[in-house]
Amino acid sequence: QVQLQESGPGLVNPSETLSLTCTVSGGSLNSNYWNWIRQPPGKGLEWIGYIYRSGSTSYNPALKSRVTLSLDTSKNQFSLKLSSVTAADTAVYYCATDSGSGNFHKWFDPWGQGTLVTVSS
Amino acid sequence: DIVMTQSPDSLTVSLGERATINCKSSQSVLYSYDNKNYLAWYQKKPGQPPKVLIYWASTRESGVPDRFSGSGSGTDFTLTISRLQAEDVAVYYCQQYYNTPLTFGGGTKVEIK
């Protein structure tokens, strides 16, 4: 059974780059879509983007100019970088997979436990 | 972008009673080639990641109690909890996976009366 675990700094300075890694166990990055989703305190869920097994990516247009996703198949990890962060980027960040393929997606399952990232000096 | 609109924002229901949550998409999420609605429902509790309850609009995930059911097609969908239990207190989200950007509804908070 695939399990995901986020890791990275819990505190980031404004204007700097937020970097998170998701480690996948029990499965391979050579299948599925690998997603990042976030939830600001007291707010709803926002999809950030995905990276496909081929390395192709798709980003939320609202964040596209600041987001970079990457894969490291040797470590079975995928990563998120979000640049020029502000307090509005404070959120619980989740990694999640969907077992879609080609141009077709499926629901997010499973999810990591989530990690809180606070943007503050 | 497909905008997902949920109603109500919050819902207070007595134990054992029915809870109904609505979700409307700004365009159809029914794919004609496979006749499937690309819509899922999640349950979110504090400190936990979202848990998928329903996918393809009406297919219950394995292990999810049968008091949870999903219905609807095209642009209008409903999640029903037939007999609310204390452990069902949570925020519920719909999500479309028809196309990118993948989008969620704003959430519906379910509480006990």
Image: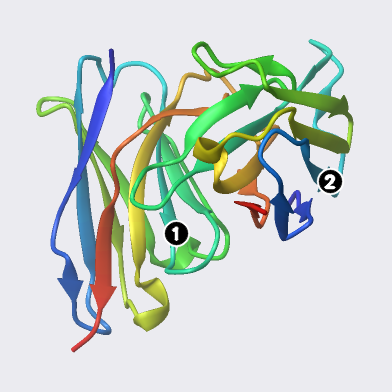
Tell which residue pokes out farthest to the bottom in this image: A121
State whether discs 1 and 2 lie on one chain.
no
User: Can you identify the residue that label 1 sits on?
Assistant: A39
Judging from the image, mark 1 belongs to the subunit labelled A
Task: State left or right for residue B82 relative to residue A48.
Answer: right
- Which image quarter: residue A32? top left
Which chain does tag 2 point to?
B
Say what amino acid the circle numbered 1 marks: Gln
On the rendered structure, is A119 left or right of A102? Answer: left
Give above or below for B42 relative to A118.
above
Residue at the disc numbered 2: B24
- Circle 2 packing at 10 Å, graded few (<14), some (14-19), many (20+), is many
Q: Residues within 10 Å of mark 1 (few under 14, many from 20)?
A: some
Quarter of the rendering occupied by the C terminus of chain A:
bottom left
**Residue type, label 2:** Lys
For the question of whether residue B101 can be seen, the reply is no
Instruction: Please state the horizontal and vertical placement of residue A7, each as a whole percent of the image.
Output: 15, 49
The residue lying toward the viewer, choosing from A69 and B61, is: B61
In percent of the image, x 27 and y 83: which residue is there?
A: A15
Tag of residue A86: none
Of residues B42 and A52, the one nearer the viewer is B42
Task: Tell me if residue B39 can be seen.
Answer: yes
Q: Is A111 displayed left or right of B26 in the figure?
A: left
Q: Position of residue B25 (x, y in %)?
A: 82, 45
> Mark 1 and mark 2: span between their CA atoms?
21 Å
What is the secondary structure assignment of the residue under circle 1? strand
Q: Position of residue A18 (x, y in %)?
A: 24, 66
Q: Is residue A90 above or below residue A67?
A: below
- Disc 2 element: strand
